[in-house]
Amino acid sequence: MSEHEFDAEQARRDLYEVMSRDTDFDTKATDALRLGRKYLGVQNGHLTRIDEPIDYREVIASSDPSDGVITPGLVMDLQKTFCREAIQREDPLRIHDVDAQGWGGHPARTDYGIQCYHGTTITVDDELYGTVCFGSITPREDPFTEDETLYAELIGRMLEHELVRERTETELEQLERFASVVSHDLRNPMTVAKNRIELEREHRDSEHLESAATAVDRMDDIVDDVLTVVRQGRDVEDTEPVTLESQLSSCRQSVDLRDATVTVTEDIEFAADPDRLRQLFENLLRNALDHAGEGVTVTVGSLRAPDGFYVEDDGPGIPGEDRETVFESGYSTREEGTGLGLSIVASIVESHDWEIEVTESEQGGARFEITGVAVPQ
């Protein structure tokens, strides 16, 4: 190009390096926009938030310095910007020379002096969020190339991903705070009720008191499971090498196996969050004990192509018509069950970016296959 050279490979490397840093969203967005400005050969770049029905356009992040002309928080009339045109299109809007390309009468040119614009629409949760746009008050000599447009779109997609992740994290934090408050408020009266029931049973016992004690214990289990569902939904960030045998060894200490037999046929090592993985095995073991009885045999082993592991038992199994719903919250075949045990398992699997499927074991029992696990060859 006559004004600058666009090195697509180097531009992508620089962008990936910026987006992989352990920094906040605003810093990542600012640095990504500055890379876009540099590699597209324009004067500035912005991430905007748009509310189309009220013609609202706000700058969320900018390549400009804090004392620059266009900084975060700047609100403009959407009708007077090229972003209005960009969000009406499926493809990016590319205007390298506003006057030469017939846009000279647009308010963005007449009111703000914009003579060069490149805009990409971004969405969050399938709804319009805004644009990633680059521009100058002077025209470019050459049209934007396909590589430059792909790069601008890549910036948009990566910022889009960060926005979704940030929104999800915020929602999870709010949900966890809510669950913690609710559990605290529930546990206090439950503790009082439990203590009063125990005191009363010391003097006299009855079927009614026994039922009340069972109900309080079940409420306690429900609170524990709800908190676990909320906390296990977070994406796994820190992993370490684990083995099936080490996880099952821990479970043997924490789960009352009674007369159950638990064996590992073929051990493997893989990366996982050890605490969450232990919760997964605990829940699957309890599921087998609850549905197959105290003498159940549980077998754990590895899978190849696709890689992963399985947990199976020799109990009555899960009917074919129920296998699509067993992981839904509230599913239970036992009156005293919370219906959250397998839902927690599914959440842990999803947080590791694995997949889970329930089938039938050779003995006719339930078999849970977890795949997508990165197992070193």
Image (cartoon, grey):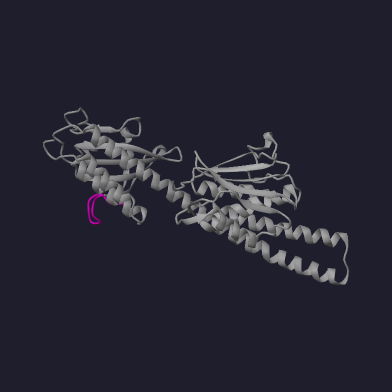
In the image as oriented, which residue stretches furthest toward the top?
Answer: 102
Q: Residue at x 70, y 36 (%)?
A: 319
Whether residue 181 is in magenta: the answer is no
Whether residue 80 is visible here, answered yes or no, is no
In percent of width and height, residue 155 lies at 31, 42
| As drawn, 101 above or below 265 | above
Asked whether, in this view, residue 302 is left or right of residue 323, the answer is: left
Asked whether, in this view, residue 282 is left or right of residue 126, the answer is: right
Q: Residue at x 19, y 28 (%)?
A: 101
| As drawn, 250 above or below 36 | below
**Magenta-colored segment: predominant secondary structure:** loop
The stretch of residues the image draws in magenta is 63-73
Asked whether, in this view, residue 296 is left or right of residue 205, the answer is: left
Toward the viewer: 277 or 228? Answer: 277
Whether residue 253 is visible here, answered yes or no, is yes
Whether residue 66 is in magenta: the answer is yes
* Total count of labels: 0
In percent of width and height, residue 185 lies at 65, 63
